[in-house]
Image (cartoon, grey):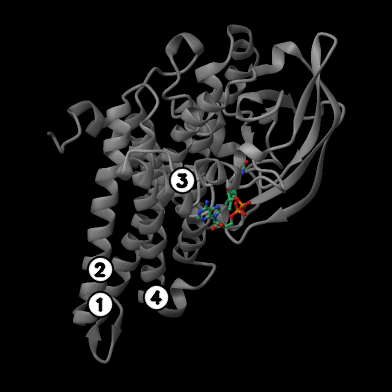
Amino acid sequence: MNFQFTAEQRLFQESVGKFAQKFLADGAVARANSREYPWDVSRQLAEQGLLGLTIPVESGGHGGSLIDAVIAIEQVTLACPKSGDVVQAGNFGAIRTFAEYASKDQKERFLPDLINGTKVISVAMTEPGAGSATTELTTSAKPDGKGFRINGSKIFTTNSPHAELFLLYVRFGPGVGGIGSVLVERNTPGFTLGETSAFMNGETWQQLYFEDCYIPAENVLLPAGGFKKQISGFNVERLGNATRSLAVGQLAFNIASRYVDERRQFGRRLSDFQGMQWKFAEMALKLESARLLLYRAAINASTGLPSAYETAIAKLACNRTGYEVANDAMQAMGGLGFSEDCLVQYCMRRARGWMIAGGSSEILLNRIAESVFNRPLPQRQASLEAAQ
Ligand SMILES: Cc1cc2nc3c(=O)[nH]c(=O)nc-3n(C[C@H](O)[C@H](O)[C@H](O)COP(=O)(O)OP(=O)(O)OC[C@H]3O[C@@H](n4cnc5c(N)ncnc54)[C@H](O)[C@@H]3O)c2cc1C
């Protein structure tokens, strides 16, 4: 077992870190407080080759491994969390599932603009009646001539106010086997977006409405039977979510540890108090252990899709760590940490959302327990009754 990055990975980590600190750190607070998508950053990151990192070269990407993207997301987030979201969107978001399963024609139509940073793709699974129980989704795709008519609605879609393309989970037929996915472009007739709402992390979203929205057969990404594949692809997104959780925790820790080492109260540095020293030692323990789980999941996946168990345990550890560490860092900085002029409170709010998004902590615990007991642990009422 080797706990070191390769020389090449270390070089990459260093160069991305230097780039991010030099060009992205200065505007980090302003970006955190803005509800706009940072398109200028998106193009800048694309020029640096930091979007499409794990997408094969023949599809227009850079042919890297998952750990390359983890390194990039982590280093950019450490300078500017909002820019880290852009690296996520261009590597581990819906783009990765899309690139995994898209046809040659679909890749040619959509990937270039997603990789050059001028467009972004969102994943729309969650519906008003289907949250953790994704397979209860009702948005339907019914055959019509050479294509399909989409009817239904989606909520909480990240980047929905900015996305040009939506990877939509739909129902072609009954049951889990009837679920697949389609690609819907913004401005497609029959597709409208509702009022803009905001989460407490500052992220905005709009409800998506589909009324007899026609899409050609060429826009089907995965036909009926594709649900398992979609979730396997989604595990990559979960790793990106875990990476950003960990990185915002680390960023809050970095800012706060510098602060308490300078700030004086009662005639002493705050870092001279043992209560404070132990707080930071506990934070370091959480960050270091969560990072090992994250790197394990990414490195074991290499250029493929990560294991569901390793992803679940890494995401849970990183989500908890990111939130708890950022929250403690905020406490350590007193009123200043709670101010909108300071990134630390933003890191805390940002990390909190990831305990719900992309598989809540409870759903991850359910998944981990399945591996512990080596059997499926059905949650659905009907499955429980059938088992009794
Ligand atoms: C910041 C953010 C970004 C998001 N981005 C997207 C996106 O881009 N695309 C998208 O489709 N969705 C997105 N979502 C939605 C997200 O996936 C859902 O919020 C999540 O799946 C939970 O669904 P729900 O909100 O309906 O809660 P519910 O499913 O109603 O759950 C409520 C609570 O009950 C718990 N619970 C549910 N079932 C069980 C169980 N079997 N055992 C124990 N506890 C259980 C949950 O863990 C949760 O704490 C986002 C959400 C957030 C907060």
Which residue is the site of mark 3? 24
Q: Is residue 40 above or below residue 230?
A: below
Q: Amino acid at mark 2?
A: Phe
Q: Amino acid at mark 1?
A: Met
Q: Amino acid at mark 4?
A: Gln
Q: Are marks 3 and 2 in contact (CB under 8 Å)?
A: no
Q: Position of residue 1 (x, y in %)?
A: 12, 34
- Measured in 3D between alpha carbons, the distance from the residue under mark 3 to the one under mark 2, in whole angstroms, is 26 Å
- Measured in 3D between alpha carbons, the distance from the residue under mark 3 to the one under mark 4, in whole angstroms, is 26 Å
The secondary element bearing badge 4 is classed as helix
Disc count in the image?
4
Which residue is the site of mark 1? 276
Residue at 50% in and 33% down: 234
Please tell me which of labels 3 and 4 falls first in the chain.
3
The secondary element bearing badge 2 is classed as helix
Q: Amino acid at mark 3?
A: Leu
Which residue is the site of mark 2? 280
Q: Are marks 1 and 4 in contact (CB under 8 Å)?
A: no
Is any part of residue 137 visible from this angle?
A: yes
- Measured in 3D between alpha carbons, the distance from the residue under mark 2 to the one under mark 1, in whole angstroms, is 6 Å
- Measured in 3D between alpha carbons, the distance from the residue under mark 3 to the one under mark 1, in whole angstroms, is 30 Å
Question: Does the beta carbon at disc 4 come under 8 Å from ligand 1?
Answer: no
Q: Are marks 3 and 4 in contact (CB under 8 Å)?
A: no
What is the crowding at mark 2: few (fewer than 14 residues within 10 Å), some, or many (at least 20)?
Answer: many
- Measured in 3D between alpha carbons, the distance from the residue under mark 2 to the one under mark 4, in whole angstroms, is 11 Å
